[in-house]
Image: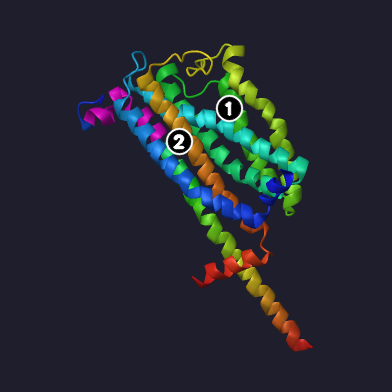
Amino acid sequence: MQFDSMSDFLNMGGYAFYVWLAYGVTFSSLAILIISSARRKRKVLTEIASKQAREEKLKESRGKKQ
Amino acid sequence: MWKWLNSYADPERSYKLAGTFLPWFVCLAIALIGVGTTWGLLFAPMDYQQGDSFRIIYIHVPAASMSMAAYMGMATASFIGIVWQIKAADWAAASIAPIGAVITFIALFTGAAWGKPMWGTWWVWDARLTSELVLLFLYLGVIALYASFEDKVLAARAAGILAIVGVINIPIIKYSVDWWSSLHQPATIKITEKSTMTGDMLYPLLINIVGFGMMIGAITLVRFRAEVLARNGMRPWVRELATQEVSK
């Protein structure tokens, strides 16, 4: 362990602002990327399902006319 | 062998294969980045010149090296997609692009946050920094091209050509610090000779580089699966998945 205490660790030898800025931006941008990527599958499948429902409706209404 | 390889280009098989690999990549990425970052932040010795500010290296170098590796992966996938008309390769390339853009942004941002205390400036227009910025624009160009065509076969071809031409930028980034005088330091990790870094500092860095690679792999698989579904919306197996998803 390179640091004596928690406050010593957070202080980063006087470079706290730069070190935590770099780590903060890195992990928050990664979090945004991961969350948006993970949500894509559900979004795509719901879109396909609603398209499917639309098509079936069209088919039904066409069937009624004839 | 071609027949065997081609069977993996089948959308349903590649979708399922990606799903099988995904948990392994996720576990490895979390474990490696967890160990590497903790080790780097808490246990690696302080740099005698840069003090604790050097700890930014544990995200800066992995992001920077993987931004180039991801680009090579994307360009290779595009090349396979264009030459052998394998659509799954095009989808893989389209999945990597946004991840590469974020990783490149991280490399640039952490570099700026490290440059300010060490060089006294957030940004300089020198060869290494500028060529890495060009890499970000290349990723954004690939994303924009892929998004701007309704016909995704055409979109993949256009984006793929840009990706392949952009490969010229990779050696420029890599050797920029040797070819031109730069504020940026030359490589510390050397493959052919002894690295100019002590093991206590080096091992967490190597762990994080591999960890970032695994993480990019994992996110690529997640995006690839969604892309396969989006491009195969007319197929019965996808429609079945869609019905299941909605009824959940």
Q: Closer to the camera, A3 or B86?
A: B86
Residue depicted at x 53% and y 61% = A42
Q: Chain of mark 2?
A: B
| Amino acid at circle 2 | Gly
The answer to which quarter of the image holds residue B207 is top left
Q: Nearer the viewer, residue B77 or B103?
A: B77
Per the image, label 2 sits on a secondary structure element best described as: helix
Measured as percent of width and height from the top left, residue B210 is found at 47, 33
Where disc 1 sits, the SS reads helix
Q: Is residue B26 above or below residue B203?
A: below
Q: Residue at x 36, y 35 (%)?
A: B35
Residue B86 at x, y = what percent? 72, 47
- Residue at mark 1: B132
Q: State whether residue B126 is above or below residue B4.
A: above
Residue under circle 2? B211
Residue B146 as seen in the image, left or right of residue A35: right
B102 on left or right of A18: right
Q: Is residue B6 magenta?
A: no
